[in-house]
Image (spheres, helix red, strand yellow):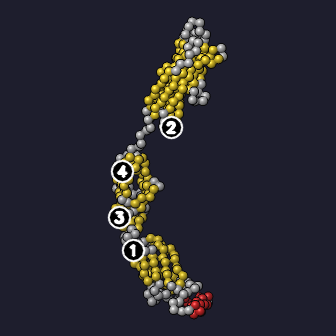
């Protein structure tokens, strides 16, 4: 952070000027973003009969900055260089008043004063670079960059720095229901999480491979008295089929993974369950539906519908 100091002299005349302030300047903040200022206190005995005196100096705006020197012998010249930390995290111009004088017979006499103006130039913004994240042979893979969620193909201009990209270990293509497994990055590394030190425009590519082999789910849907339920709708995520007259159903070409199965029928409560199909093999399930407590019958009056519902409930309770 460059500083461009200027100083003006405004002496306060004592009977015999004893202390003068010279060489006022500032320095850039080389440590911890601090603005530093250096100035020289020049003390001298003006005449042979000037008594020995102690020099004092301070930065008026900084509480507790007043300091005292050893006594200066008459007729001698002594220079003191003072370095002061003015302020941290400087972003605007600073003005400080530097005062100096001497102590005579126990009384502080101010001999000189100067004003230091530090003009501050804010640091330039950090450089930016373009980061591109691709995935192959599929696109539309959701991943995270630090805490942000993004989707391939991804391109954004970011400040120079370090970023962590995490790709999913497995990805299901919603358009085809095919499942893919993360294989490697373009540099051959196989961890789906990697750290990028973005110091130039960078492109990275995640390679996926299709999980070969599909599972098959077969089953029977049963209802009242354990009888098969025909025309029940069976859904496995986005895959849907209907039971036949024997209550049986089959869903094929299922990528291995975890799914939610739903079964619906006008006479029965909705059935929902999470099932795991981890291997490319055939799985068989048996689903028992529960009859609804109230049923509406098209074309029947309220009394007739109530009678039928009560009969079904009575059978259900056996």
Few, some or many residues within 10 Å of mark 3 (<14, 14–19, 20+): some
Residue 138 is marked as 3
Instruction: State the residue lying farthest toward the right.
Output: 106
Q: Earlier in the sequence, mark 1 or mark 2?
A: 2
Residue tagged 2? 89
Label 2 residue SS = loop
Mark 1 touching mark 4, by CB under 8 A?
Answer: no
Label 3 residue SS = loop
Residue 148 is marked as none
Mark 3 touching mark 4, by CB under 8 A?
Answer: no
Task: Residue at 43%, 79% (x, y): give it.
Answer: 240
Label 1 residue SS = loop
Give the vertical position of 156 relative to 235 (above or below).
above
Nearest to viewer (mark 3 / mark 1): 3
Front position in the image: 107 or 287? 107
Q: Earlier in the sequence, mark 1 or mark 4?
A: 4
Mark 3 touching mark 1, by CB under 8 A?
Answer: no
Residue tagged 4? 130
Would you say residue 283 is visible in this rendering?
no
């Amino acid at each position: 952070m460059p500083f461009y100091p200027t100083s003006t002299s405004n002496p306060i005349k004592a009977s015999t000027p004893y202390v003068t302030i010279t060489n006022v300047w500032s320095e850039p903040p080389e440590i911890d973003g601090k603005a530093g200022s250096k100035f020289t206190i020049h003390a001298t005995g003006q005449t042979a009969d000037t008594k020995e005196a102690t020099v004092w100096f301070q930065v008026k705006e900084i509480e507790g900055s007043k300091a005292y020197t050893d006594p200066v012998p008459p007729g001698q010249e002594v220079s003191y260089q003072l370095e002061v930390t003015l302020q941290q995290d400087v972003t605007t111009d600073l003005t400080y008043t530097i005062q100096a004088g001497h102590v005579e017979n126990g009384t502080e006499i101010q001999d000189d004063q100067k004003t230091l103006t530090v003009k501050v130039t804010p640091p330039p913004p950090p450089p930016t670079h373009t980061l591109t994240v691709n995935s192959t042979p599929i696109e539309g893979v959701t991943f995270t960059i630090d805490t942000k969620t993004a989707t391939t193909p991804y391109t954004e201009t970011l400040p120079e720095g370090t970023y962590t990209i995490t790709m999913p270990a497995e990805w299901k293509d919603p358009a085809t229901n095919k499942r893919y497994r993360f294989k490697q990055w373009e540099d051959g590394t196989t961890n789906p999480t990697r750290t990028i030190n973005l110091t130039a425009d960078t492109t990275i590519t995640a390679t996926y491979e299709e999980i070969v082999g599909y599972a098959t789910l077969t089953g029977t849907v049963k209802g009242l008295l354990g009888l098969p339920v025909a025309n029940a709708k069976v859904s496995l995520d986005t895959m849907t089929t209907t039971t036949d007259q024997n209550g049986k159903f089959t869903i094929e070409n299922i990528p291995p993974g975890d799914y939610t199965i739903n079964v619906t029928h006008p006479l029965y409560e909705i059935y929902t369950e999470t099932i795991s199909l981890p291997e490319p093999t055939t799985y068989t399930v048996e689903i028992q539906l529960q009859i609804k407590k109230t049923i509406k019958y098209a074309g029947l009056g309220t009394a007739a519908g109530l009678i039928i519902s009560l009969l079904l409930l009575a059978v259900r309770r056996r």
